[in-house]
Image (spheres, rainbow, N blue to C red):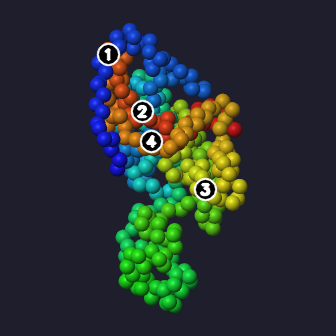
Amino acid sequence: MWKPPERIRHPLPAPAWPTAAAAAVARWFQPVEVGPVRLAERTWVPAMVPWRATEEGFVTPEVLAWYERFARGEPGAIVVEATGIRDVPSGPLLRAGDDRFLPGLSELVSTVRRASGGRTRVFLQIIDFLSIRRRPEREVFLTRFLKISDSLKEKLSVKGDVEARGVLLTLSEGDLRAVLSEREWHDLQFGARELVTDLHVPSVRSLPEVLPPLFASAALRAERAGFDGVELHFAHAYTMASFLSPLNTRDDGYGGARENRVRVGHLMPVGPNSVGVMAFSRKPSIRRSASRRPGSHRHRRSRRTGRAGRSMANPHWASHRWCRALLRSPGLHR
């Protein structure tokens, strides 16, 4: 890696904490209208997944404690972690794909309201993702997951599937890469995952018709649970980000040219009184949060003492490729 020939040490600026009066009139602590929702101030805790839900996607006491600690700082808004819109296994990730998740989500909202004294607005980030597997062991992949095609048997000069798997196990890394397709090699190295371009898979081909109702249903459940709105997750190579990607080469009108790649996003059912704020970065990046300690009281102290604290969480949320939309309104029901 390139390094500059000389290290430049810049002097640190002298700390100049504002007075309580100066902090009180700072724009950071002024209210702001976000569509039909009014935030008491302009601090925003972005969505972060703490992996505290159950394996079935239910809210746990640990989840409630996580968000209660944030809410005690009374930020303008808290966005609850990525929550799956489908009722499918997804590990310790919250879900909103069925009504049975409503009691836990409602309790989460009540916890935030109570801990913040009603000052903090709370939103739910909703996400869709396609099938994905962890990177397998070489032997497991070759004996269980790899589909033996006729072309692969021809390359190996064998007739049966069992014989083909036996030969594959004996190949060197270079020889194995030579006989596997680019997709098969990628699945071995990184784990198999469905792509939005897998149009031969019926469930993937139908995504443009399936996704809008799924997101709408999850948004309505969020409203019933008491959330002030939802945030659509358009980031990190998950389903919606994959539709937006230049690598999306679907030939059914939802890939290729930019206007086609954004079509699924335009199909999302946003009500007439809703607001959609697109926060797209030029270069997608994931940065570590400014503070690893969740929900510290620095924010509340800064308002009372005039000390200017840092953001309680990742301050770079605006650089992430997700869309804030479907804010709570009667339009959700239309």
SS for callout 3? loop
Q: Mark 1 Cα within 10 Å, few/some/many (few <14, many 20+)? A: few
Query: Contact, CB < 8 Å: mark 3 with mark 2?
Result: no
Quarter-wise, where is residue 200 in the image? bottom right
Residue at far right of view: 253
Give the label, 2 or 4, closer to the camera. 2
Q: Which mark is residue 248?
A: 3
Do the residues under discs 2 and 1 have CB atoms within 8 angstroms?
no
For residue 287, say whether it is visible: yes
Alpha carbons under labels 3 and 2: distance apart: 30 Å
Give the CA distance from mark 4 to mark 1: 35 Å
Q: Residue at x 34, y 31 (%)?
A: 295
Q: Which residue is mark 1?
A: 16
Q: Are marks 1 and 3 in contact (CB under 8 Å)?
A: no
- Mark 2 lies on a secondary structure that is loop
Gap between marks 2 and 1 measured at Cα = 21 Å
Query: Looking at the image, which is closer to me, 62 or 16?
Result: 16
